[in-house]
Amino acid sequence: MPAFDTRLLINGTFVAGDGTPEKTFDPARGALIAEVNSASVLQIEAAVAAASKAFESFRRTTPKERSLLLLSIADRILAEADALARVESLNAGKPFRYVKAGELANVADVFRFFAGAARNMQGAVGVNYRSASMTSLVRRDPVGVIASIAPWNYPLLMAAWKLAPALAAGNTVVIKPSENTPLSLIALGAILNDILPPGVVNVVCGNGPDVGQALISHRDVRMVSLTGDIRTGRAVLQAAAGERIKRTHLELGGKAPVIVLKDADIDDLVGTLREASFYNAGQDCTAACRILVDRSIAADVEDAMKSMVESLVYGEPERDDVEFGPVISARQQERIAGFVDRARGEGAEVLTGGEKTGSKGFFYAPTLVRAPFAAEIAQKEVFGPVVTVTAFDDPEEAVRLANSSEYGLASSVWSADQKAAVRVADALEYGVTWVNTHGVFATEMPHGGMKNSGYGSDLSMQSLLEYTQIRHIMLAS
């Protein structure tokens, strides 16, 4: 087992945490791979102070200067993709080949996109709105110190979604990785530290109640960006209403409905859901996890899905043939099992899967469940390799069911009739809706939720705007 760097990054220096150690595991084997000391309160203070000090000069850098820094980061990420992917694959349990070829390329692409976006900020042209002697200018300034809380399912990619737009806008950042998966973000910190001025990005580790809460509550933090669950989102909102009002950016999970109309291409649907439902063991806020299917083709969809699910290959992430690995922890494995066991007890039918597997590690078999839409397993975010199927009688019922959810992040509609699909898509209350596909992202397009899935956009020029403060300056001549 290689030795991993477990130090915090504060003001350009790597230091051991002074707080409680958090155990980090290889979820494929259930084996301890590192202990990462949490940041103490004093170290959190030091990290925020370093970011505040760095902001004084970093905010004055030109868009070109910030752009070149982000491009350098992207180049280094690709140059070190193999090492970064091996750390993330081991710590998060994702197949190495997918992390290296897909996710790391996306991480670099995010930094490259915002390198360009930094030089293309749009603003109003100076105009004499009030009188001929009064010229109004609109500008966008960086917000200040950003506290970013990254999740465990995509440690590097979600860090990029947060860091790249914040830095492109001229902000400084204190970022906390999940205590489950800190190792790849610490490794990324070494790259950032080589390229950025000291204090521009600081990495502090630890759990949410102690380290996360202290960070988001700090009086000098001007904005909090979280990808997490609804409970944590509420904690962020409470902290944001403290001594100094903070801006917030929240992505709080989802329960993506897949609405299948009676003329949908079932082969295309099932082929897409092979990845869209089960990539990363279904531990994805946009995973296609609940199928709403027209009753006339429900049996055909169930049969095709069952055959596909039973053909999925899962196992240790270093294998070249696996499509997904373990879930993140024993706790998550038990949580998923609890959902499926309760569904059985309530009368839902497990069509395939529905059990923990393997003699070691935190594996759960890919699972398909026929369940009424009101069932807990069809309503709550399971965050595992579990898909539910529910029949509906007409598209209006499907829309009503989908929109009754507390979540509003991602959705998809499947139909050979483009007009019918667009009518359904138009009626859905979700931040993103795909038609005849699912889970396809473009860095140029915004990604964000509605309702309890949060608000604010990741990716796109809109995300860059999220990390700026609009200002009006009037000049009297």
Image (cartoon, rainbow, N blue to C red):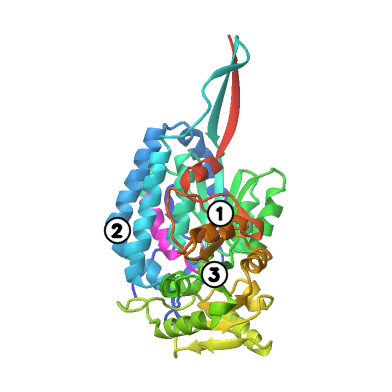
Would you say 434 lies left or right of 317 here?
Answer: right
Q: Residue 7: in sight, yes or no?
A: no
Mark 1 secondary-structure assignment: loop
Locate the C terminus by quadrant. Answer: top right
Residue at the spot of label 2: 80
Can you tell which quarter of the image residue 377 is in? bottom right
The magenta-colored residue range is 178-193
> Any magenta on residue 188?
yes
Report which residue position mark 1 lands on.
448
Q: CA distance from mark 1 to mark 2?
A: 30 Å
User: Any magenta on residue 111?
Assistant: no
Q: What amino acid type should be assigned to the residue bearing mark 2?
A: Glu
Q: Is residue 14 above or below residue 139?
A: below
Q: Amino acid at mark 3?
A: Leu
Looking at the image, is mark 1 or mark 3 nearer the viewer?
Answer: 3
Question: What secondary structure is the stretch in magenta mostly built from?
Answer: helix
Residue 3: image x %, image y %?
36, 70
Q: Nearer the viewer, residue 445 or 54?
A: 445
Question: Which of the two marks, 3 or 2, is nearer to us in this view?
Answer: 3
Q: Which mark is residue 381?
A: none
Labels 1, 2: front one: 1
Q: Is residue 431 above or below residue 374?
A: above
Q: Which residue is mark 3?
A: 261
The image shows residue 1 at horizontal and vertical percentages of: 34, 76
Judged left or right of residue 82, residue 393 is: right
Helix, strand or loop for disc 3: loop
Q: Picture coordinates of residue 55 (x, y %)? A: 51, 38
Q: Residues within 10 Å of mark 2 (few under 14, many from 20)?
A: some
In the rendering, at what x and y percent does residue 45 appear? 58, 49
How many numbered marks does the figure carry? 3
